[in-house]
Amino acid sequence: MTNADTQEQAAAGAVIIPVTPFQQNCLLLWCNATRRAVVVDPGGDVPNILDAIKQANVTVDQIWITHGHIDHVGGAAELRDALKVKIEGPHLDDKYLLDHVAESGIQFGMTGGRNFTPDRWLSEGDRVSIGQLSFSVYHCPGHSPGSVVFFNDGMRFAIVGDVLFNGSVGRTDLPGGSHGALIKSIKTKLLPLGDDVGFVCGHGPGSTIGHERATNPFLVG
Ligand SMILES: [Zn+2]
Ligand SMILES: [Zn+2]
């Protein structure tokens, strides 16, 4: 292992908290130098998220949202109020979802969901940061119109929400979905990030861009 590897591994820490009946991968990610953290996609089960923050012994500064589906945003307003932090993302094109969090939650038997407006809508090329870690924002419509992906170049690491999965891609049968747009987003924005890039996705195990490029049935051919 080289020095550079050691430094990269020490730059960040992370823990995944599966939340909601959809087992959504809520991500607690922190900068090791500053112990400042972000919660990505607090879909629900907020007490479990608060427990994880306490165990990691980090200070959460922000909440980032990849897209507006209930399993990713159902706990956002509650967590924002509990921690008194700001919400960044998703893209404005998912506003229609954030305006209906409460009723969407009821449909799926999830209580406590509240509509909210993020403190900052994100667009292609924006940057978000936590402690000393900086991520660039890619607008990747298809699964939902306002889906965004977060990418940290130095760590070769991406947070892709429900755009791309290990062995699959996001569903596009929900209102606002487009399979053509989704595949275009993946091929023009995610695959060019590089085969060595690892990612965490919204459900199930993560993967690498290279593995998906070579084996994902939706991308091969
Ligand atoms: Zn989704
Ligand atoms: Zn999801």
Image: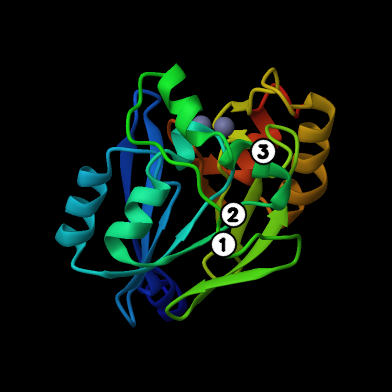
Callout 1 amino acid: Arg
> At x 58% / y 26%, what residue is drawn?
167
Residue carrying label 3: 96
Q: Is residue 157 left or right of residue 111?
A: right
User: In front here: 187 or 179?
Assistant: 179
Q: Is there any visible trace of residue 162 in the rendered image?
A: yes
Pick the front one: 29 or 81: 81
SS under mark 2: loop
Tell which circle, 2 or 1, labels the residue nearer the N-terminal end.
Answer: 1
Structure colour scheme: rainbow
Q: Amino acid at mark 2?
A: Val
**Picture quarter with the C terminus:** top right
Residue at label 2? 197
Mark 1 vs mark 3: which is more N-terminal? 3
Q: Mark 1: few, some, or many residues within 10 Å (few <14, many ≥20)?
A: some
The mark nearer the N terminus, 3 or 2, is: 3
Q: Which secondary structure, mark 3?
A: helix
Classed neighbour count for the residue bearing mark 3: other residues with Cα under 10 Å, few (<14), some (14–19), many (≥20):
few
* Quadrant of the rendered image containing residue 118: bottom right
